[in-house]
Amino acid sequence: MRQCFNIGVAVMLAAGLSACATESRAPVGGSMSPLYGSTGPLKFDIIQEDDATSFICLHYRGRATRQMWDKRVDNEFNHSVFLFDAYFTDDIRFEINVNPEFETMERATRESFRYTKALGQLPTMLRRGIDRFGIHDGDETASAGAGKIFVYRANAINRQGYQHLEETLFHESVHVSLDPYYMYNQNWRAAQEADPGFVTRYGRDNYPREDMAESSLLAYGILRYPGRIPEKEEARIRAINPNRIAYFATLLPVEGPIFDFPDTGPLSLEDAPEGCMTTVPV
Ligand SMILES: [Zn+2]
């Protein structure tokens, strides 16, 4: 901590960085009040029903022991989960772990399919960091960290009710795929410093952990899908986050393909194991 105080304010300003930010809960620059509480309840339909998905199929592998973090009890447990592999055309594959509380393979399968198409709609770069996708019952908000995303059934159903499940998954995937590499990136920190304020209170109050997940979703909406965020709101977001938006224009796939296929071309059902399910079995 001492080092922080030895660095002159002028030096910090010149570098466009706060030398102590990693140790401080206080937000970086900007005096403008956040526009929204959080992106969770926002009704902007940024990733839409008809957008392409890279999801191919879901392969059931049986029961296996996996550790699952559970917000409902604020603890991690070993569960005999329903274990699936999700296959995607861009050669991404990760496990889906369904909490045994869903009881039957049929219910676990149906529950997994709630998310698979939407997961496949995320750009390849946002799925690269997902090692495991865990599904619980209950109504907690989703959480993510260290390659794992956890979601809760009732909360997901609620989000589906206003076409916001895709956006929720976008937010969580930023935590596992971008945060580990960019949260302390110098250009990102400089953008945060230079902007007039945080776009959401949640991003500001949980700095630095939630800022990228919160602001990248809105930047992606503006840059990738013009018109999907209402004009007036877009203008407000651009005004409070001009530097963050410019940063995401270089980081996210805002033009061209969002899926990064192997040189040999997109994978198909033929590349997945026999019995891999493309839809919920009847
Ligand atoms: Zn978050």
Image: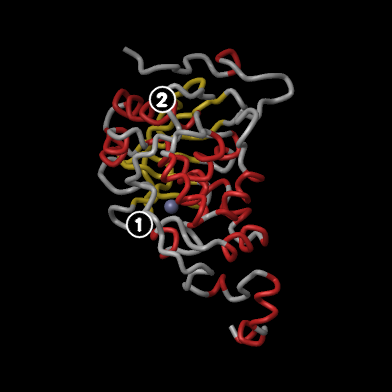
Residue 278's quadrant in the figure?
A: top left
Given residues 246 and 123, the one toward you in this image is: 246
Q: Earlier in the sequence, mark 2 or mark 1?
A: 2
The amino acid type, in three-letter code, at marker 2 is: Glu
Specify the label residue 75 is tagged with: 1
- Name the secondary structure under disc 2: loop
Tell whether 200 sits left or right of 242.
Answer: left
Amino acid on which disc 1 is placed: Asn
Could you tell me which residue is drawn at 56 percent across and 70 percent down? 22
> Where does residue 74 sit, x and y in percent of width and height?
33, 58
Q: Which residue is mark 2?
A: 49
Which quadrant of the rendered structure holds the N terminus? bottom right
Q: Secondary structure at mark 1?
A: strand
Which residue is at 53% across, 69% downward? 28
Q: Residue at x 36, y 37 (%)?
A: 164
Near-viewer residue (148 or 174): 174
Q: Residue at 74% x, 23% y: name it.
A: 263
Q: Position of residue 248 (x, y in %)?
A: 60, 47
Select label 2 or label 1 by which is in front.
Answer: 2
